[in-house]
Image (cartoon, grey):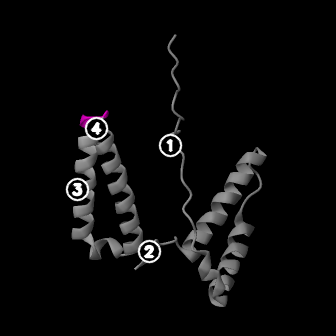
Amino acid sequence: MDFYIQPKRRPQGQKVTRKLNITKLKNQLTAQDLQLRMDSKLLDIRNDQSSIDEQWESFRDTVHSIALETLGQVTRNHQDWFDENDQEIQKLLEEKRRLLRAHQNDTTCTAKKAAFNNIRSTVQAKFRLMQDA
């Protein structure tokens, strides 16, 4: 008897809403600008859609588009610790990969498994130190 676990489905085609930069709302001028734009646009929304779902979608899309225009998207700031330590990181990863291949080629050898586990924990610890520095 064969059992097969199906992977979770990832439905395609769904629109991902972009995150808004709500930290801009701390500025009074930006908050007032957003409020004025909302007031003017929400008055223009028509309620003659046939269903409550269409009314909700119209309201939701209008509010999100106004907020996106006013506040903008959140920008991600990546830390630059990787670029500073690139050569050291590459050496550590190469050593870890070498020991992983050795362990995978001979899975019964406990010394190779112990060496791989040791280098893996060492690499993780060094990466954390680099990241914190």
Mark 3 or mark 2: which comes first in sequence? 2
Looking at this view, is 69 or 44 the one in front? 69
Q: 100 above or below 74?
A: above
Q: Amino acid at mark 1?
A: Gly
Q: Is residue 64 left or right of residue 53?
A: left
Q: Position of residue 87 (x, y in %)?
A: 21, 69
Q: Is residue 22 left or right of residue 46?
A: left
Please report the residue visible at 23 percent of the width from the left and 42 percent of the height from the top.
102
Q: Are marks 4 and 2 in contact (CB under 8 Å)?
A: no
Start and end of the magenta stretch? 104-108
The residue lying furthest to the top in this view is 1
Please report the residue visible at 39 percent of the width from the left and 61 percent of the height from the top.
124
> Circle 2 is placed at which residue position?
77
State whether the magenta stretch is mostly helix, strand or loop: loop
| Secondary element type, mark 1 | loop
> Circle 3 is placed at which residue position?
94
Mark 2 or mark 1: which comes first in sequence? 1
Judge the density around disc 1: few (<14), some (14-19), many (≥20) Cα neighbours within 10 Å: few
> Circle 4 is placed at which residue position?
104
> Circle 1 is placed at which residue position?
13
Q: Position of residue 43 (x, y in %)?
A: 74, 68
Q: Amino acid at mark 3?
A: Glu
Mark 4 or mark 2: which comes first in sequence? 2
